[in-house]
Image (spheres, grey):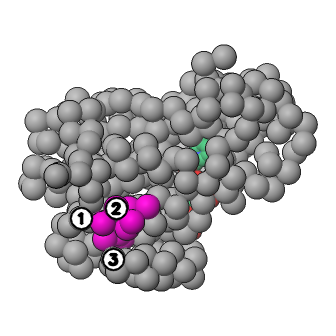
């Protein structure tokens, strides 16, 4: 019987694969049968993820790539296609969180966050989409955040450029989904709530006051556990979602509904 979630024979590209949610997703792709190209700036960390994937009998291609740099993105996409012959899945996951209100943020903060979180996704798509269109197949998954749709008044948590960049990811996803449906390319986004990662472990998770607040407003009274995002990533990346495009799934234990 066909398993719609099976990714055997597929090639996935994951940006921000050196830690956190991206590393977990890359390993999940391999577990579902895909070969994976791993992109990030820290190649030593990519090497560790690659070893885990190879130990599972799948191929991994670690590539140094700063998503702020168009030339590096173009070169990385070319290398993946040369190495694997194709790209079926793109998980646009690389991102940074910079705290601050519009009054506190510098222009440099704003540009760095927007260039990483939003312009980086545009550039990855710019070089991957023509290849997917040619092959009439593609699954693009863009990592947004629950912070695309919720905010709160606490100064310590206010992250205006993060909110803006993640809402931008949502808009980019809609536009791309509308343009490329006829090419059999689906484009969806995911809005994680709070998950432990390099981004959050020394900031939000280390802040008892914040954790009490998060657990109090969260219907499940806890942050996400490692791996709890993978089901949604695999769904959007596989044939299980072949007629689903332009959609956004929030994986946050219900924070955004209250
Ligand atoms: N954790 C959460 O609670 C949460 C919630 C909502 C959304 N998210 C989103 O999930 C995604 C992954 O975050 P995470 O929580 O897993 O944090 P993380 O552990 O800090 O991972 C971020 C990843 O992005 C990469 N990255 C950052 N800047 C980059 C650049 N200029 N070029 C290439 N890669 C870059 C990092 O790799 P290098 O440093 O090696 O380049 C790293 O692999 C982000 O988009 C984040 O906004 C996370």
Label 2 SS: loop
Q: Label 2 near label 1: C-beta < 8 Å? A: yes
- Identify the residue at horizontal 56%, vertical 40% (top origin): 192
Q: Is residue 89 above or below residue 164?
A: below
User: Disc 2 to disc 3, how far (Cα)?
Assistant: 10 Å
Ligand 1 rendered quadrant: bottom right
- Identify the residue at horizontal 75%, vertical 24% (top origin): 217
State the residue lying farthest toward the right. Answer: 209
- The magenta stretch is 28-37
Q: Is tag 2's residue or tag 3's residue first in the polypeptide sequence?
A: 2
- Identify the residue at horizontal 43%, vertical 43% (top origin): 232
Q: Could you say where residue 253 lies in the image, as x and y percent from the top left? A: 62, 32
Q: Could you say where residue 158 lies in the image, as x and y percent from the top left? A: 75, 32
Q: Is residue 27 above or below residue 141?
A: below
The residue under label 2 is 32
Q: Nearer the viewer, residue 164 or 140?
A: 140
Label 3 SS: loop
> In the shown orientation, is residue 210 left or right of residue 181?
right
State the residue lying farthest toward the front. Answer: 1
The residue under label 1 is 8
């Amino acid at each position: 019987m066909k398993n719609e979630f099976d990714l055997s024979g597929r090639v996935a590209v994951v940006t921000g694969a050196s830690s956190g949610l991206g590393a977990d997703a890359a390993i999940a792709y391999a577990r579902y049968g895909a070969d994976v190209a791993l992109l990030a700036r820290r190649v030593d960390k990519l090497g560790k993820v690659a070893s885990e994937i190879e130990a599972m009998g799948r191929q991994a291609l670690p590539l140094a790539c700063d998503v702020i740099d168009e030339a590096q993105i173009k070169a990385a996409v070319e290398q993946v296609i040369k190495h694997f012959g194709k790209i079926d899945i793109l998980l646009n996951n690389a991102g940074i969180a910079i705290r601050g209100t519009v009054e506190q943020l510098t222009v440099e903060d704003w540009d760095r966050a927007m260039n990483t979180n939003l312009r980086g996704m545009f550039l990855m798509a710019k070089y991957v989409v023509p290849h997917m269109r040619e092959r009439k197949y593609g699954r693009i998954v863009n990592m947004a955040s629950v912070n695309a749709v919720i905010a709160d008044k606490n100064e310590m948590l206010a992250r205006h450029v993060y909110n803006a960049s993640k809402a931008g990811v949502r808009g980019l996803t809609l536009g791309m989904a509308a343009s490329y449906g006829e090419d059999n390319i689906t484009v969806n986004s995911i809005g994680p709530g709070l998950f432990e990662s390099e981004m959050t472990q020394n900031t939000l998770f280390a802040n008892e006051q914040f954790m009490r607040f998060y657990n109090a407003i969260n219907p499940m009274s806890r942050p996400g556990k490692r791996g709890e995002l993978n089901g949604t990533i695999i769904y959007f990346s596989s044939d299980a979602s072949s007629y689903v495009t332009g959609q956004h799934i929030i994986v946050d234990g219900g924070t955004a509904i209250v």
